[in-house]
Amino acid sequence: MNPVLDPPELGNPDIRLIAVDMDGSLLDDDKRVDPSFWPLLDQLHERGIALCPASGRQYATLRDQFGRDDLVYIAENGAYVVHEGREVGCTPLGAAAAREALDAVRAAGDDTGVVLCGKRSAYVERTDDAFLDQVRPYYHLLQTVPDLAAVEDDVLKVAVYDFDSSARTARALDGLDGVMVSGPHWVDVMDPAADKGVALRQVQHARGIGPAQTMAFGDFHNDLGMLAAAQYSFAMDNAHPDVRSAARYVAPANSRNGVVRTITAALGL
C-alpha cells in the first residue's frame, strides 16, 4: 500500500490541471471546504493552473459551491462537463436505460430512494426528510414529481440512495450497464461511456494538456478513471483500499485538509 506523502516528494512538476473529487477528498467530514482553499484557488488561477472540481454532484450544486465560472466543472460523475457556463461535454443515459434502472430498483423493494438526474434539474418521488436530507446537499435544483418515469428531460444518470448499503443496490442492479458504486450508500447508473476519467481526458485534449501535467485527487471507485488519467494521482488517506492501490501517491485524509496541503507543498505555494 502506498505510504502517505506529507509533504509529497514530487520534484518540480509542471502541473497545469488539477482535478479534485469533492466528497471524501476536498470536503471534510462535515462536507465543508477548508478556508485555506480559497486563497489557494486564486494562486492557481494566477499561475494559469486550471482547477477542475469532479464530482457526482449536480452542476448547479458545484457552481453554487465555488461561485465562479472560470473553472471546468465535471458534474454527475463525468456525464456533464461545463466551462464558463457553457456545456462542453455531455453523455446522457437515455430514456430506455433510465427506465430499466428505475424498474430494477422498484422490483428490489429495498429501503432506497431514487434521484433522476437531468440537465435542467434533478427529480425525486420520495419526499420524506430522511431521504431528502441525503439528497439536498448534492442537488440544489430539485423537483418532486409523481412519476420519475414520466419526466421529460435529458437524463444524465439515475442515482440511488440505499439506507442499508450501496452493495445491496449494486447487487439489485447487477446485469445493467454503467452501474457505478460512488459511495457507501450511493449507486449511480450512467451511460457506460460516462466516467470522470473520460471527462478529464476531454478537458486535457481541449486545453492541450497531457497526463504528465495533471494532478488528481479521489477516494472512491468513481474516481478510478480520473486517477488513471493523471500522472500525479493521489488517493486520500481515507480512500477505499482499491483506490489507494490504483493511485501513485497518497495524500493526507480529507479530515486533515489533504488536498490543499498536498497542492501547496507540491507546487511550492
Image (cartoon, helix red, strand yellow):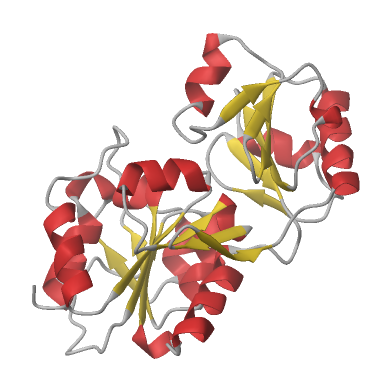
User: From the viewer's perspective, is 96 left or right of 155?
Assistant: right
| Image-quadrant location for residue 29 | top left
Residue 76 spot, x, y in % from top left = 58, 50
What is the total number of numbered labels drawn onto the structure image? Answer: 0
Query: Residue 65, percent across and down?
Result: 34, 43
Rendered position, 192 above or below 99: below
Of residues 167 and 214, which is closer to you in this image? 214
Specify the quadrant that holds the N terminus: bottom left
Residue occupying the far left of the picture: 269
Q: Vertically, is 183 above or below 15? A: above
Q: Residue at 46%, 71% (x, y): give it.
A: 227
The residue that appears at 37% across and 41% down in the rendered structure is 64
Q: Position of residue 133 (x, y in %)?
A: 48, 19
Residue found at the far top of this picture: 128
- Left or right of 82: which side holds 262? left
In-image side of 61 versus 153 (left or right):
left
* Residue 23 visible in rendering: no
Q: Where, quadrant-wise, is the C terminus in this rendering?
A: bottom left
Is residue 250 positioned above or below 107 on the image? below
x, y (%) of residue 174? Answer: 82, 46
Please state if 2 lies on the left or on the right of 230 as rendered.
left
Residue ID at (75%, 47%): 154
**Viewer can see residue 224:** yes
Front residue of this view, candidates 253 and 53: 53
- Residue 159 occupies which quadrant of the picture? top right
